[in-house]
Amino acid sequence: MMEKTTAIILAGGKSQRMGTDKGFLDLNGKPFIKHICDALEPIVESNILIISGNKEYDAFGYTRVEDIIENKGPVGGLYAALSASKTKINLVLSVDVPLVSTELLKWLIANHNSTNMITQTKVGDKTNPLIAVYDRSMKSVFGEHLNGNQLKLIKVIEDIKHQTLVVPEKWNDQVQNINTQEQYQNLIK
């Protein structure tokens, strides 16, 4: 049996390159956020936290958490998320990965070594700390970085015990981030 897990979806970005909130972009008749939640529910049921100041996310019926300290990027979002989480294991996803599957996420959790604070994914030479498992104790580390205004997530991860898992090739397309209109148009073709 899988240890109780909280899913965290970071949806608080400014979406400057996309020009609109990515979580509400349509893919096959459903918004990105719904695709992600559908992949998460078999693992965490309704234990999903959406990190966003956008009240429109309330319509999906999950707990929405606002940043404790605004405009601090993923470090601030993760601090708020881990402050709200009640579980040791937290499955973290950005809102711009609508192709992610339950199968990939179960693989990620199953391969997470609990001696690590973070288990992130990697495809090719690109690591993805926003398709990852985070230990709730990372909250204090994020708090320290926020206090020092150190907001680069990659730098936070470098300083702690972590692991990086190479995503099996069959799932490579699932971890692509849809950040620009061009990427979105290619996705919906």
Image (spheres, helix red, strand yellow):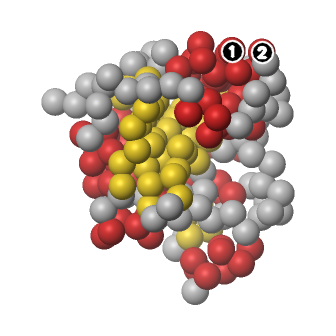
| Residue 15 picture location, percent across and down | 78, 55
User: Residue at 39% across / 52% down in the picture?
Assistant: 39
Q: Is residue 77 left or right of residue 2?
A: right
Q: Which residue is mark 2?
A: 147
User: Residue at 81% across / 24% down in the picture?
Assistant: 149
Give residue 69's quadrant in the image. top right
Depth check: give the residue in front, 40 or 141: 141
Callout 2: few (<14), some (14-19), or many (20+) C-alpha neighbours within 10 Å? Answer: few
Q: CA distance from mark 1 to mark 2?
A: 5 Å
Of the residues shown, which amino acid type is indicated by label 2? Asn
Secondary structure under badge 2?
helix
When the figure is inspected, residue 154 is found, relative to residue 96, above or below; the finding is above
User: Residue at 54% across / 45% down in the picture?
Assistant: 130
Give residue 42's quadrant in the image. top left
| Residue 181 picture location, percent across and down | 74, 73
Q: Which residue is mark 1?
A: 144
Regarding residue 45, the answer to whether it shows in the image is: no
User: Residue at 71% across / 78% down in the picture?
Assistant: 182
Quadrant holding the C terminus: bottom right
CB atoms at circles 1 and 2 under 8 Å apart?
yes
Q: Is residue 125 left or right of residue 50?
A: left
